[in-house]
Amino acid sequence: MLNSNSIKKEIEDKNIYVDNSCIGDNFINVTLGNTLKVYDTPFLDVKNSSPTKTITIPEDGYVLEPNKLYLGRTNEWTETYGFVPMLGGLDELATLGMEIHITAGFGDNGFEGTWTLEIICALPTKVYPGMQVGRLYYYPLIGDSNIEYRGKYFRQVDPVESRLSDEYSLSRKKEN
């Protein structure tokens, strides 16, 4: 894992880019954007896209409901080449019963964009735009660094709902 001096060097060498970066001991802090998405349907079907509604987080905060999935995003746009970034939540938020990602903590070599956050909380929790929500850690990539991510979440800006249904659509087209 890269330490702060290594992160600074890789930023200088343009292998890592994070706008508005706040570098810690061995990570870069990331903050919450001002929009959330929630699924607007009684159930989710992995083979079909589901409608969402967008919530703007006011400056005085927004209270998240327990057991409800919110899709947020980082304020920070990141680009990574030759490293595997990993998003980790804050211990301080975890002790409040709030998670910022459920399973998708690792990024890809060549990813460019903001990070979608899968936010859930155990108790009603008030969040604010721009609050610190996580940390990006960087691990050296072993193998061919010329294979860069250019998938369905490349260059995302807003919180992005699941695009798993795209894969089912592609497999149906191949079958026909």
Image: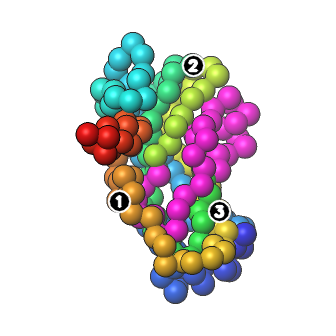
Name the residue carrying label 2: 66
| Callout 3: SS | strand
Quick one: which residue is furthest to the top in this view?
42
Closer mark to the observer between disc 2 and disc 1: 1
- Asked which quadrant contains residue 53, the reply is top left
Name the residue carrying label 1: 155
- Asked which quadrant contains residue 102, the reply is top right
**Label 2 packing within 10 angstroms: few (<14), some (14-19), many (20+):** some
| Callout 1: SS | loop
Type of residue at label 1? Arg
Look at the picture and state if 112 lies above or below 156. below
**Label 1 packing within 10 angstroms: few (<14), some (14-19), many (20+):** some
Type of residue at label 3? Tyr
Q: In this image, 34 relative to 67: left or right? A: left
In x, y percent, where is residue 7? Answer: 62, 76
Point out the stretch of residues depicted in magenta: 88-115
The residues bearing labels 2 and 1 have C-alpha atoms spaced at a distance of: 30 Å
Q: Residue at x 35, y 17 (%)?
A: 41
Type of residue at label 2? Pro
Q: Are marks 3 and 1 in contact (CB under 8 Å)?
A: no
Query: Which comes sooner in the sequence, label 3 or label 2?
Result: 2
Which colour style is shown? rainbow
Q: Is residue 66 magenta?
A: no
The residues bearing labels 3 and 1 have C-alpha atoms spaced at a distance of: 20 Å
**Label 3 packing within 10 angstroms: few (<14), some (14-19), many (20+):** many
Q: Residue at x 65, y 50 (%)?
A: 88
Q: Which mark is residue 137?
A: 3
- Quadrant for the N terminus, please: bottom right
Can the viewer see residue 57 in this picture? no
- Asked which quadrant contains residue 111, the reply is bottom left
Secondary structure mostly seen in the magenta stretch: loop
